[in-house]
Image (cartoon, coloured by chain):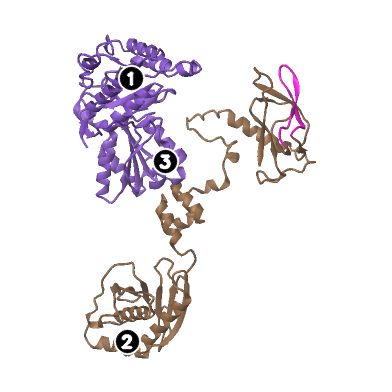
Amino acid sequence: MREITLSQAVNEAISEEMRRDPTIVVMGEDVAEAGTPFKILSGLVEEFGSDRVVDTPISEPGFTGIAVGAAMTGLRPIVDLMFGDFLFLIMDQLCNQAAKTHYMSGGKLKVPMVVRTNMGATRRSAAQHSQSLHALVAHIPGLKVAMPATAYEAKGLLKTAIRDENPVVIFEDKLSYQEKAQVPEEEYLLPLGVASVRREGRDVTLVGTSSMIHVALDAAKLLEAEGISAEVIDPRTIVPLDEETILASARKTSRAIVIDEGHRNYGVTAEIAARIAEKAFYWLDAPVQRFGAMDVPVPFSPALEDLTVPTPEAVAEGARRAMRGELIHAA
Amino acid sequence: MRHEVTMPQLGMAQDSGKVVAWMKSIGDSVDADDTLMEVETDKATMEVPAGRSGVLAEILADAGSEVPVGDLIAVISDEIGAESGAPKPAPDKPAPPKTAKFEEAIRASKEPEPAPENGLAVESPRVAPIIRKGGAALGRVLASPKAKRLAAEAGIDLRSLLRRGVSEPLLAADVESAAVAPASAPSALGAVAASDAFDELTEFLRDSGSGLSADLAWASFVSGALRATGLRKGEIAVSYRSVSAAGEEFVCRDADLAKLATLSPEGDEPADIYITNLTESRFSSFLSGQGGLPHLVVASPNQGFFSLSVQFSEQDLPLSSASAFLEELMKRVEHPVRHLL
């Protein structure tokens, strides 16, 4: 099968959908002429024209608000939010308007829009351009949240999100844009709320979101050399969350570790760990562990920044301690 | 079944109600439509039906008391005495002491205990007797949730694992290995064999200057008896120890297939059979609580005789097999030359 980058996969998903449905428009800063700073949308404006691929002023609340209104009145906008950190600017448009309009209008209005944005640290972009803020929107009922880990997920989930009748926020990992993966030539969709078991195992379940799936897979390799068999699960979307797959795995292995690049405090790892603890409690042989970004502003110093994110070594050590029953001292 | 009766919301803005009177007493049968009590709000006084048939088991709010909406005020149970297990007051006896205690507990659980002056948070002693169960004060066994579930399913007392020396926290694997271990004490079968021929062999080995000892002869004979009865096939490992000044201890494999002169004691546990030899000591019996099974104890309580005792788990080794093994062993001990040739 051919291999393409995550960036190409996103471009393909949007182009294919725009060809299929003339109501789909793209809007955001530098999306048309520049094709975004990551060159993801290159070629779109040439094919679909500047009416459907719209460069906006530097005003996230403005263009997101326009998109919400456009979605209510018949278009299917894809909003490009240049950095996930700018979510703070569009909280009202996204969380108070887009998320609640369908409910508050008694189902008379719908908001079929997609917010594409990104996440992930270790790109030396400092504290205001390195955050992973998906937990903020995952907390709001009415928003779906997808976290593609590879080009394959990026394309399949984005196409599904575009066709969804509700607002969907997609977080792409900045460092993964140039990562290649096998992507079929023929069209495919990936359903929201269906996890992918990336590796089967017997002793410990590693749940990793977005690029943390690679941390989990690398940790699994380290553990394999020591005879510890790890099962690795990518939830793909955190809202809806494929709880069944995660719980079934935790029950099977009786140990679970959750890895996510958002801050550890009050984050996605806490939510998933809590569900495992609530619903698989009597199958657990060790406490559920969480690995997330350190609870500090992301440092600009490369040496320090690298210390703030989960590593395969740390995850593997967590798994070993769980196997040895050492976590009794974790508190 | 226990059904809780709470202070009903009788008006939109009502946040509490006053129990004017109870129409039923503890122990009375009630029908769902029966009036259970009269409640007064700031607007009106209303009769409140029980809502559920059964027996009025507990009254938790005295007549005259003001109770927040939603708070527990009574319990209706399907049967008398089916609840808490504590004896219920007879219907004709007044219940005030109990009611008072519950009220106190409810109040105590709602009002945060003021922090002591040293700033340390402590549990309210007033609430403690109700929240805590007596056994909890004795300390808990630290075990994983899975270990606890497996232990409950297999009927294993986790404390028994601690007594066996398994360290905390107890994990699923600890419980699983406990589940396969024999739950009961081992069985034991004993016999007496003439020792004169074997003693001669021992003397001969000692005087031959070969460095060989009776220890290897025992290992060889036991191994041979085990093989002859067909209890073990393939390689047979024997773990041997002698209670003596020399304190011989070894594991050897297929001791019966090699000549004594070429036998080299080596190998690791676990073994197929364990031997404890007391013949060089003044002891006559030994029962191991820890060691593996089957376990043969050899002693020499009287001149001219060995006492042979095999301890075994009847789950693993039926009595008929254990006795066949002892027969075979006695033949070898009483006629060692036959075995060696």
The residue at which mark 3 appears reads as A247
Q: Badge 1 local density, few (<14 within 10 Å), some, or many (20+)?
A: few
Is B318 magenta? The answer is no
Residue in the foreground of this view, choosing between A331 and A308: A308
Q: Quadrant of the C terminus of chain B?
A: bottom left
For the residues labelled 3 and 2, the Cα–Cα distance comes to: 61 Å
Would you say A188 lies left or right of B164 here?
Answer: left
Residue at image position (27%, 69%) is B267
* Location of residue B299 by image quarter: bottom left
Looking at the rendered structure, whether the residues under marks 3 and 2 are on a common chain is answered as: no
- Residue type indicated by callout 2: His
Supply the letter of whichever chain is brown.
Answer: B
Instruction: Identify the amino acid type marked 3.
Output: Leu
Chain A's colour is: purple
For this rendering, which residue is in front, A276 or B99? A276
Is B46 colored magenta in this rendering?
yes
Residue B79: image x %, image y %?
71, 44
Q: Tell me which amino acid carries mark 1.
A: Asp
Q: Is mark 2 on a helix, strand or loop?
A: helix
Looking at the image, which is closer to me, A272 or A307?
A272
For mark 3, give the secondary structure.
helix
Q: Is residue B331 toward the left or the right of residue B16 in the image?
A: left
Q: Residue A162 carries which label?
A: none
Q: How far apart are marks 1 and 3 (CA)?
A: 38 Å
Q: How far apart are marks 1 and 2 (CA)?
A: 93 Å
The residue pinned by badge 2 equals B339
Q: Mark 3 lies on which chain?
A: A
Tell me which chain the residue with mark 2 is part of. Answer: B
Query: Which range is magenta?
Result: B32-52
Circle on res. A21:
1
The label nearer to you, 1 versus 3, is 1
